[in-house]
Amino acid sequence: MWFDGDFCGECWGIPEKSPRNPRESPSDLFETIETLPYKVQLILSEFGEDDITYEKCDDILSRCEAEGYTFEYGLDAIPFNLTKIN
C-alpha cells in the first residue's frame, strides 16, 4: 500500500515544495493512517500503487465521506490532504 508510512510525494512526481505535497500539510491524515478509525483504514487500503485511477479515487472519496473524512485529488488520481469533516 502506498500509505504505509513510506509514502513519498516525490515518488509520485510531486515536487518537495508543491502545495500538493502531503509532507507540506501538517494536518494531512494520510501521514498518520494508523490513527484513523479501522473502517476508514479498510476503505483506504483499497488504494494500490498500480491501480490508482480517477474513478477509484471518486469511489473511495464517497465512502470516506460517509465515514466523516474527505480528501482531495487531481486528474492525476493522486490523493492528498486527508482530513476529518467538521
Image (cartoon, helix red, strand yellow):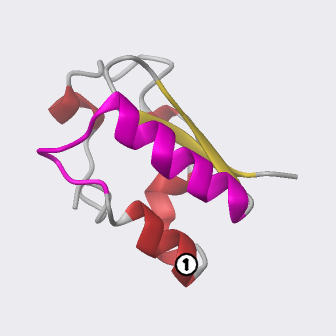
- Amino acid at dot 1: Lys
Q: Residue furthest right?
A: 86
Q: Is residue 62 above or below residue 40?
A: above
Q: Measuring 44% from the left and 20% from the top, which residue is drawn there? A: 74
Judging by the rendered image, the residue that carries numbered circle 1 is 39
Question: Which stretch did the figure color magenta?
Answer: 47-67
**Residue 25 point in image, percent of width and height:** 57, 37
Horizontal arrangement in the rendering, residue 4 relative to residue 34 (left or right): left
Q: Residue at x 17, y 44 (%)?
A: 51
- Residue 11 position, x and y percent, is 16, 34
Number of numbered discs on residues: 1
Question: Residue at coordinates 48% horizontally, 51% vertically from top-left?
Answer: 60
Q: Residues within 10 Å of mark 1 (few under 14, many from 20)?
A: few
In magenta segment, residue 48: yes
Magenta includes 76? Answer: no
Q: Is residue 23 visible?
A: no
- Viewer-proximal residue, 82 or 6? 82
**On the picture, is 73 further left or further right than 55?**
right
Task: Tell me residue 21's x, y (percent).
Answer: 42, 29
Query: Which is more toward the observer, 84 or 65?
Result: 65
Query: Which of 41 and 65 lies nearest the eye of the viewer?
Result: 65
Note whether 49 is above or below 43 in the view shown: above
Q: Is residue 84 left or right of residue 63?
A: right
Q: Quadrant of the N terminus?
A: bottom left
Picture coordinates of residue 29 (x, y %)?
56, 55
